Amino acid sequence: MLLEAASWNLINIRKTVTSQQLQSSQAGYRFSRGVSPEMAARSNYRAAELIRLMGGGIIIHDLIDEYPRHHIPNTVKLPLGEIQRCLGIKIPTGEVVSILSSLDFIVEKQKNILHVTAPDHRLDIGLDEIGAADIIEEIARIWGFENIPETQIADLTPKQQNNIPLEKEERIRDILVTLGLQEIITYRISSPQQEQLLQTLDDGPYVHLANPITPERSTMRRSLLSSVLECAENNSRFQQRISLFEIGPVYLPELASSEKHTNLPHEAQRLSIVLMGKRLSLSWTSKLSDSMDYFDLKGVIDELLQASHISDYTITPGEHPSFQPGATATLTIHGLQAGAFGVLHRDVASNYNFGEYPTLAADFDLAMFINAMPDHYTIKPVPRFPAIVEDIALIVDERISSYEVIELIINTGGKMLTNVQLFDVFRGEQVGTNNKSLAYRFTYQSELKTLTDKDAAKLRTKIVKKLQKELGAQLRSE
């Protein structure tokens, strides 16, 4: 009878078990976690001795040892003061030596340093500082964790440094939740087929997984909006009203930094919003409710920008392959395009099972929001003097947007014009062909005095003349 005992490299075994899917193998499970090669000879001697004693065998040949890489004993230097520093208590040196010796450690004391050699089977003991921490943990385990008193930290706590970008990101989350949206966290793993449902022009490379779980989860996503729409589709069968948002990264290999000499993709943070369904939740107070439209989404974005104290931004009509023409807007912050939003294109919506309601979506570069948010902002005191409110109706060309009108009104009105609000739009024979009537509510207020009707009329006349000159607008009452 020939007895063989062997030991294998745990890294090689672990790779083989993973690649060949041999997780059910008991030998693979054991050796992938490490078995000391020194135990091979002992187990062989022990097996031969048991055969001799119990089976009447005769050992006729000595051990043949093929051992190209002999195990080097792991000796760790452990200062006695390090034990007290880590545990907070002073354990007698004799007790420390006794504990380690009972665990088969070889201990040699030289002055105030213990030279501790780990037994062959303790492959979990690390080297140098890590090994010292492992040995201290063994001492504390045998000494008894319940015998270690609770003490206050004696070292100085490090100076707190705020993570400003993270605080701003959390602020955006809080604002959107306050506006009635629900945050979701979706899979960061997607597939090119899933993201092609958006019909975008982005055909960049993907980060492919070496061992995907399913074909539907084979690549790292390039579009956050695709993930949110997938979640909205799954929930649209059960909910009449959906208002979701997500903040998360997308993975862009083509933007990886070449300076760092790495193959890791660039992780760009995005913000995506999806609205769909009834404007109001089902309630006995409002049995009939209209479905949400473009202006519901724009209202959410306006409130987000104002609550974030972002001032230098514009919302203009735009184009995007995923959104419906004529119902798409582009958000620009500090002169740079931050994203687009609008009504999802009919061809794109047909790729999802959304039902009868129009789908409103937005996709933004979160970094542009964070960079535009001020670290500090001032709060104005409550006005001491009353305001004057009046309404005017303007007839303008159909091609002129309300944004252009409001921008010109604000620039002309100055500080005393504290608010401008569009509250009515009218088209008909009364205002002429290719024209429309825009009704605005002006709020005049001064921080220094109570304004009179004469002050308001003077400012109104100035605004109307500017509108007539720049935009050809006319007062509807004229």
Image (spheres, rainbow, N blue to C red):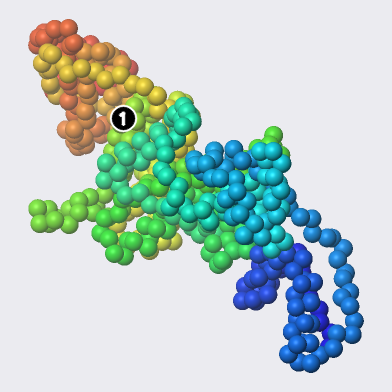
Q: Quadrant of residue 57?
A: bottom right
Q: Residue 235, relative to residue 21: is it above or below?
A: above
Label tally: 1
Say which of 208 and 437 sits in front: 208
Q: Is residue 184 left or right of residue 105?
A: left
- Provide residue 175's location: percent of width, then percent of height: 31, 38
Q: Is residue 299 left or right of residue 110?
A: left
Residue farthest toward the bottom in the current orientation of the protein: 56
For label 1, the crowd category at 10 Å Cα-Cα, with few meaning under 14, some 14 to 19 and many 20 or more, is few
Residue shown at 38% from the left, 52% from the top: 184
- Amino acid type of the residue tagged 1 in the rendering: Gln
Q: Quadrant of the C terminus?
A: top left
Say which of 36 and 296 sits in front: 36
Q: Quadrant of residue 98?
A: bottom right
Residue 473 appears anywhere in the view: yes
- Provide residue 372's location: percent of width, then percent of height: 43, 27
The residue wearing badge 1 is: 306
Q: Residue 96, relative to residue 88: is it above or below?
A: below
Residue shown at 81% from the left, 82% from the top: 3
- Provide residue 177's location: percent of width, then percent of height: 30, 44
Residue 328 appears anywhere in the view: no
